[in-house]
Amino acid sequence: MRVWTLAIAVLALLVMTAAVATGASITDTAKAIKKGKIDVGRITGMEPGKRFHNIHNRVLGLQCNSCHVGSLAPDYPYQRKHKDLQMGQVDRGICLGCHKANGPAETKLYGTMAE
Amino acid sequence: MAVSRREFLKGAASLTALAMMGDAFFDLSEAEARVPYAPKEDVLIPSTDVMCVNFCGIRVRRVNGVIRAIYGNPENPQNRGHLCPKGISGIFDTYNPYRVKRPLKRTNPDKDPSADPRWVEISYEEAFEEITKRLKKIKKEDPRKLIWHHAHGKYLIRDKFPKDFCKAFGTPNVVHRTTVCEAARHVADEITWGYHGFLPDLDNCRYFLNMGANPMEAEQWARWLDRKIIENIERGMKYVVVEPRLSNTATKAHEWIPIRPGTDALFLLAMARELIDNGFVDEEFLVTYTNAPMLVGRDGKFIRKGDKPLIWDKKSNSARPYEGDVEPALTGSYTVDGRACKTAFEVFKESLKDITPEYAEEVTGVPAETIRRVAREFGEAASIGSTVVKEGHKLRYRPVSIHTFRGLSAHEYGVQTNRARMLVMMLVGAFDAVGGMHLHSVYKKPKYFKPSKCEYPPNRVDLQESVFFPHATHNVAQQVALTLLDPDAYGLPYRPEMMISYATNRPMSASDIKKQIEGYKNIFHVSIATVLTEFSNMADIVLPDKTYLEAYHWSPTRWNLEYKHIAIRQPIVNVYNLPYDAFDYLMIFAERIGILDKYIKKINKTWKTDLKPGRRYSSEEMLAAIAKAKKTTLQYLKEHGLKAKKLHAKDIYLKGVEKKFKGPGKPKMNFYAEQLVWTAEKVRETVKKHRIKNIRTDNLDVVYSPLPRKEHAFPTPHLEAKDYPFYLCTYKRMYFNQTANATVPTLREIAHDSDENFVLINASTARSMGIGDGDWVYVESRIGRVKIRAKLTEGIRPDTVAISYHYGHISSGLPEYARKGVNPNFIIELHPDRVAGMNSFNDTKVKVYKA
Amino acid sequence: MRLGMVIDMRRCFGCRACVAACKTENMVQPGNYWNFVLEYEQGKYPNVRRIFVPMNCMHCQDPPCMKACPEKAISKNKQGVVLINYDKCKGRKYCIAACPYGVIHFIGNEKTFYPDGKKTPYEALPARARHPLHRKKPGIAEKCTFCWHRIEKALKEGKTPGSDYDSSPACIKVCPANARYFGDLDDPNSEVSRLIATKRAIQLKKEFGTKPQVYYIV
C-alpha cells in the first residue's frame, strides 16, 4: 500500500461546519443526498473528488483533520503495520456518531451494542 | 486431532473429487463456477523442517508440482503440528531467485564479501577437477591442511558424513558452530555430569526459573518448550525470567527480573547462599549423588588414597574412599595424614561468605530483597525430601528447574556461570527428579571428568582441547579465522591450504567480523551453498546445494520427555534442476581422490549400515540403508515422515543420575570440578615449557576455578571499558534463523518491525539523552561503531542496550532489500571463554550517541 | 451454524505463525494481510508487559462492510462466514471505510513476493489450481475468509469445522501457543462456546454493534 503520511492536526479538532451543526440538519442533508437532491457526483469511490469525500467533506463540511487524526494509540484495535495512520485509516469512532443504528446518517452501518 | 497418513492421502484424493462436484456452499459467479478447482495434483508430503534448529514435522502441500503450502505435522512429538513463521515460509527459501544455480568461480582477487567476486559460471566437471586436484595435493603433503566448516549443514545432511569424509581424508579439522550458540552450557554440563543437554520437566514443575533462554523467539526445543511453558503456567507453575531485555518469552512470565548482562553468576551464588542459610539443602542428594562430601586439600585438589578421593566417614570417624558401608560427612574441616582439608561443600559454603544479596545487588542490579525472595520461593517449591509415585516407581520430587541457553552461556565466564546454575540445582537435588531438570545421557563420556591434556602444539586449527581452550569439546568456531591470520602465534604445526564450507556464514556469526573476514581471505575456499552469504561470497568456488525441500536427509530430531523419534526429509521439488547436494559432493570428492571405499567403510561403522564398497551411493540409497539399520523402511518414513517411540517414567527419571551416580562405589556428579584445578596446573606448565606468549597465566585460578566465584561476574570489558556506559546484549528474533533466510520476503513483512533491526534503548534513558523513537544513533564499542535506528522501550534495563542478530548483511551476492539493518558482531569484543572457547556475545560495553 | 474464533491473548507470545500461515495459505500479496498481529507495551520499567493482538476479519454477525458495499459484493453465508465476491467487487473501498477493525485490504497493483517482479511457481499457479477464493486480481478488496476453502471441504467430508488440523483455518492448529480456537458458536458444546462461557472472553469494539464472531480471552 502506498504510504500517505497525514498531516497531524495541530489545531483543535474542528468537527463540523455550520451546515451540520445539529443532528437534525445532518438527517435532512442525509435524506437529501439519498434522494439525489444534493449533487454528490455519480462515481462511487473513496478518492477525493468521488462520492465519499464529496458527501463528507464538500457537503457535510468535515475537515480532513476531523477524521484523519494523525496517529492511533498503541492499543487501538485496528489492524495496521504502522504506528502512524496510513491512507484510509481513520478512527472509526468518528464514523460511529452518525452511522450508528439510531444515528442521523441514512446508511446505518453499525448495529446496536450487544448486551 | 492427529491426522493419519491415510487421511493425508484420502484428503488429497477427495479434494479433486470435490472439485468435480462443483461448489455447494459458496455463491460463485457463473464465470468462476465454470473454472472449478481442479488441479492435476494436490498432495500432502510429510517431511521435516530445518528453517531453524527445531526440526519440526511438516506436511508439504504440493499442487501441480508446486509447493503450495507448508503445514505442521500433528504426528510429530516435538511440534505437534505447530510451526513458526520460518517453517511456514520455507516455500520462499526454495523458490528463491537469488539461489546459486550453477557452479561459480571467482575472477576478482579481492575477497571482501561486499566486493563483486565477478563470478563466472563453470561446469561441474571443471569445478570437480579443480577441487580434487587440490585435495589430492593436500592429502599427499599433510591432510590436516584441509578444513571443513559447517553450521546449519550439520542439520541438513548431518555432520556425520563430513566427519567420516574428513577421517577418511586424514584431517582433524571439522568445525561446527556451537561456540556461537551454547557451547559453554554444554561444556559446563560435561564437566559436571559427563554429557550435555537437558530439558526441564515442565509438566510437573512448580517453579521455573529461566535465565535468559528465549524459546518463544528462537533456540533449540523451542516448539516444545514454548507450548509446555504456556500450558503449565495455566496449570499453576510459577514462571520467572531473569534477563536484561524483556523477551517475548519473558513477557509471558509472572515476574521479569532485569539483570545486568554478564553478572548472572553472582545472582546464582547469592541465591545459593540464601538457600544454604535458610536450610534449603538436599543433604541426601549432595551426599549420595555428588562429590560435595569429598575432602579438598589446601591446593584445591582432593585428598586421595591411591587414585581414590576420600570422604570423611562419620561411622568410622576416618577418611575413606566413597565405597562400601560409609556415611560421608557433608560439612566440616578435618585433618588427614597431617593435611588440613574440608569437604567440597564446606569449601563452597565458605566461598559464599562475602556474597550477600546486598553485594549481589551492587553488581547485578537485582534488588537484594528480590534475590532473597526468589531463593525462598525456589527453596520452598523444591519440596526437599518429598517423593512421588509415577508408573509404579517411587521417585524424588523436586518441582523446580533453572533453564538457560545463551543467557548464561554467551559470556567470557559462560562455563562457570552455568556451573553456578547447576550448583543451585544440586543444592535442592533437582536433577533427574520429577518436576526438576532431566539430564540427557548422564556420564556418557567419562573422559569429561578428566583434566584436559592441554595439547600443544595444537592439532586442530580451531585449537579445540589445546592449551588455549582445554575443555573445548564443541569446536571453537570463531578461532579458525584468527589462527589463519597468524598460525605461528598459536604454534600450529602446518599451514592450512584449503577450506570447504557447507551451509555456514561463519564470519558474520562471530565477534569482530572484520577480523574474521581478514582471516578467511588467506585460504582457498570452496563453498557449498544455496545463496551467496558473506562467507560464500568470499569463496573461490561455489557449488550449488539443494534446499531441504529438494533433498533426502536423515533428519536430526529433538527428543522430549514424552517421546523420541526418527525422521527424514524427502524431495518435494527441484526448482533449478540441481543434480547434486552436499551428500553427493562428498561422495564425488571421495571417489575422485581415491578414498571412496575408506569413506564408505567409515559410514557403515557410524550408521551400522551395510553399503558395499566400490561405488558411490545416492542420498536416497543412503537413507534406505539407515532405515534398515534402524529396523524400519524408507517407504514407511516417506509415508509418515517419522517414527516415534513413547518414553516412560523409568526412561526419564531412572536412567540418569539414579543409575550412574547414586551411592557408594560410583562416580559422582561434580559439585566440585576438581579436574579444572589439574587443568590449570597443566596450562601453567605447558605455557612455561613452550614459552607461549599469548596465554594469560595470572588469572588461571579464576578461569579454571573448581567452583564459580564472584570474579566470574566481571567479564573483561566490564573491568576495562570504563568510558563506555552501556552494556550491550544481543538476541535472536522469531523471524529469522541466525544469519539465514534474509531473502525470504514473507518474513520481512510478517510483523510491523521485522524488516529491519534497531537498538533497543530504555525509553527514559533515551529521552534523557535526547534520543527519540526511530532516531539514528551510533553504538560504539572499543572496536568500532555502527549506525542504527533507536527503538525506545520500557522493556530493557536503563543501563543496557540490545541489538538483534539476523540483519545487516554486507554480501554483494544478496539483494539490497535483504541487507537492511545492522549486525552487532561488528562491534562485539571477543573474550572467549577459556574453558570452552565460547564466544562472549553479551559482555561488550558501548557508548550511544545521536548520529 | 455460526462459525467463530477464540483467541487467547494470555497465551499468544507474538510469534506471527498465524500471520505467515494465513499469508501463504491464502496467497495474500506483499503489503496486504488477512491476519496481522498488533503489538504494544503496557506499563513502565520494570513492570512492563508486551501485548499481542492477532487481528483478522471478525466475521461480524452484523457486518458493516456488507451494508456499506455499493455493489452488494459482500455476503454472509449460512455458516456465518463473511465473504467478498471478487467478481462483483468493483474496488470502491466502502467496506474498508466501514470496517472498524481495519482488516479489509485493497489490491492495487499486483505485486510479486520477490522484488525482481517475476512470479515464483507458487504465485504462477493457474486459476484451475487455485480455489476461487484465491483467484484474486487488482482492483478488488480482500480479507480473511476463515479459510472457507478448508471449511467447505470439511463440511463436504462430513467433518466438524475446527475438529482437526485441516478442517480449521490455517492459522488455528499451527499456533505454537495453542492460543487459537475455531468452531461453531451456536453449538454450546463446541470448544469455542465452552471457552467463551468459562473464561473472560471479550469482543473488540462492541460499541459498534457489529457483534463480532471473534472473541479474545484476556
Image (spheres, rainbow, N blue to C red):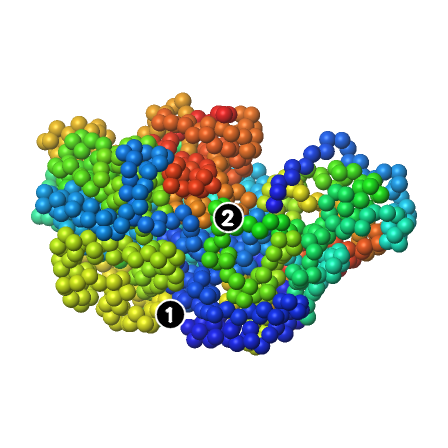
Residue at the spot 38% in from the left edge and 38% down from the top edge: B812
* Residue picked out by circle 1: B640
What chain letter is assigned to the residue under label 1?
A: B
Q: Quadrant of residue C47?
A: top right
Residue B182 vs C123, above or below: the answer is: above
Alpha carbons under labels 2 and 1: distance apart: 37 Å
Q: Nearer the viewer, mark 2 or mark 1?
A: 2
C190 horizontally vs B152: left or right? right
Residue at the spot 48% in from the left edge and 58% down from the top edge: C122
Residue at the spot 12% in from the left edge and 54% down from the top edge: B594
Residue at the spot 37% in from the left edge and 71% down from the top edge: B639
SS for tag 2?
loop
Extreme top residue here? B723
**Looking at the picture, how far across and down is residue B51, in whole percent?**
39, 53
B364 horizontally vs C153: left or right? left
SS for tag 1?
helix
**Looking at the picture, how far across and down is residue C1, in whole percent?**
66, 71
Q: Quadrant of residue C130?
A: bottom right
Q: Quadrant of residue B703?
A: top left
Towards the viewer: C176 or B265: C176
| Badge 2 amino acid | Gly
Quadrant location of the C terminus of chain C in the rendered image: bottom right
Marks 2 & 1, CB-CB < 8 Å contact: no
Q: Residues within 10 Å of mark 1 (few under 14, many from 20)?
A: many
Q: Are marks 2 and 1 on the same chain?
A: no
Can residue C158 be seen here? The reply is yes
Towards the viewer: C50 or C57: C57
**Looking at the picture, how far across and down is residue B617, in whole percent?**
22, 63
Can residue B457 be seen here? The reply is no
Residue A66 vs B24, above or below: the answer is: above
* Residue picked out by circle 2: C117
| Badge 1 amino acid | His
